Amino acid sequence: GQRRRSRFHSKSCRRKSRASARARESERERREERERRGVETMSLCTHALRKALGSGVGAWLPMAAAAAASTSGLGASAAAAAASGAGSTASLKSGLALGAFRTSASAAVPAPQYEEANKDFKIYRWDPDNGDKPRMETYTVDLNDCGPMILDVLLKIKDEQDSSLSFRRSCREGICGSCAMNIDGSNGLACLTRIDKDTETASTVAPLPHMFVVKDLVVDMANFYSQYKSVKPWLHSEGSEKVDGKEVYQSKEDRAKLDGLYECILCACCSTSCPSYWWNSDKYLGPAVLLQAYRWIIDSRDSITDERIQQLDDAFKLYRCKTIMNC
C-alpha cells in the first residue's frame, strides 16, 4: 500500500509539471503573437498615413505612430483606416489623435512654470576656533524650493550652501526644545516658526539672547540646567499613604492643577526673554525654572512641599521677578 501511494504521488507530480510546462509554452506563444501583430499594425499604419498625408510629414509621422502604439496600440479608427489604405486625411488624423490620447497622460501635460522666490536670511556666525569676531552672514534661499519653517531654511543652507553652520535640532515637532533661537527679534522654536514670506525684507536668526555662545546658533545651557536641577524636579513621596503599597492616590481635581505646568519642554525661550534673567542669570531662577518649581509644590502627592517653598524664599531666586511679563 505504501508503494502504491508513492507511485501515485510521483505520477501526480509529473502530470502537474507537464501541465505547468504547457502553460508556460502557451503564454510564450501568445506573447510572441501579440508582438508580431503590433509590429505589423504599426508598419501598416505608418505606410498608410504617409501615403494619405503626403511626403512632407515623413519626419514626424513614424514617431507619432510609435508613441501611439507604445502602450495599447493605435486607436481602432486609425488601425482600420490604415488597413483599408483608402482612409481620408481627417479620419486618419482623428484615429491618430485617439491613439495618442491613450498614451501616458504626462506626455500631454506641459511642464509647470517654475518661479523663484528668493529671500535673504541674516544668520549669526561665530567660530571660537577661528578667532574672528561675530558677524551676521547673509544667505539667499528660494522659498519655493524650501519647507515652510525656519528650521527648513537652516537645514537647506547647511546642506547646500555652508556645511559649517552649527545649530541644535532634533524632533522637528516642538517637543524637544533643542532648536530654540531668536528669530526676527523674538525667541521661538525654529521648527514651529514659519518663514516670513515677504521677500523684500531679510529675516534675522540669532542665538538665544544673553547666553554664552558655543558656536553660531548653539548656546551654553549648563547654567539653565543647573538651576533646574536645584529645584529637585522629581516626586518625593516618602511617607505618603500608598494604594496597595505602590501608588499614591491623587484626585481628578488635584491632577487638574498640574495642567499648564508639566507641559514645559525646557527650551529656555521664556527665561532668555526676561530682562531680570539677563541681569541676574547667576542668581535669579527665571520663568522656566520657577514654573517647574511650582509644578512640584502644587502636586498633592509630594511630601516635601514646605522644604521646596523654603528653598525658594530668597531675594534673588524668586523675588527678582519684577512682573515685566516679557516671558
Image: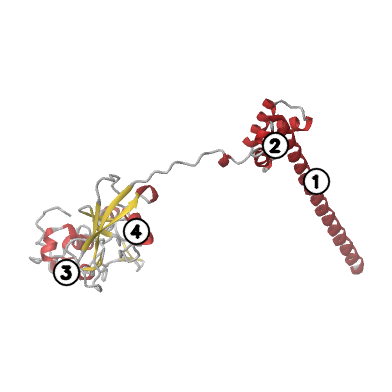
Task: Work out whether 219 lies above or below 182.
Answer: below
- Where does the image place residue 268, in percent across and percent down from the top left? 23, 61
* Residue highlighted by disc 3: 307
**Amino acid type of disc 2?**
Leu
Helix, strand or loop status at disc 1: helix
Helix, strand or loop status at disc 2: loop
Can you see residue 77?
A: yes
Q: Residues within 10 Å of mark 4 (few under 14, many from 20)?
A: some
* Residue highlighted by disc 1: 33
The answer to whether mark 2 and mark 1 are in CB contact below 8 A is no
Disc number lying in front (2 or 3):
2
* Residue highlighted by disc 4: 157
Q: Residue at x 10, y 64 (%)?
A: 279
- Where does the image place residue 41, in percent across and percent down from the top left? 76, 39
The answer to whether mark 1 and mark 4 are in CB contact below 8 A is no
Q: Residues within 10 Å of mark 2 (few under 14, many from 20)?
A: many
Query: Between 38 and 228, which is closer to the camera in this rendering?
Result: 38
Q: Quadrant of the image for the N terminus? A: bottom right
* Residue highlighted by disc 2: 74
The earlier-in-sequence mark between 1 and 3 is 1
Query: Between 225 and 319, which is closer to the camera in this rendering?
Result: 225
The earlier-in-sequence mark between 2 and 1 is 1
Farthest left residue in view: 315
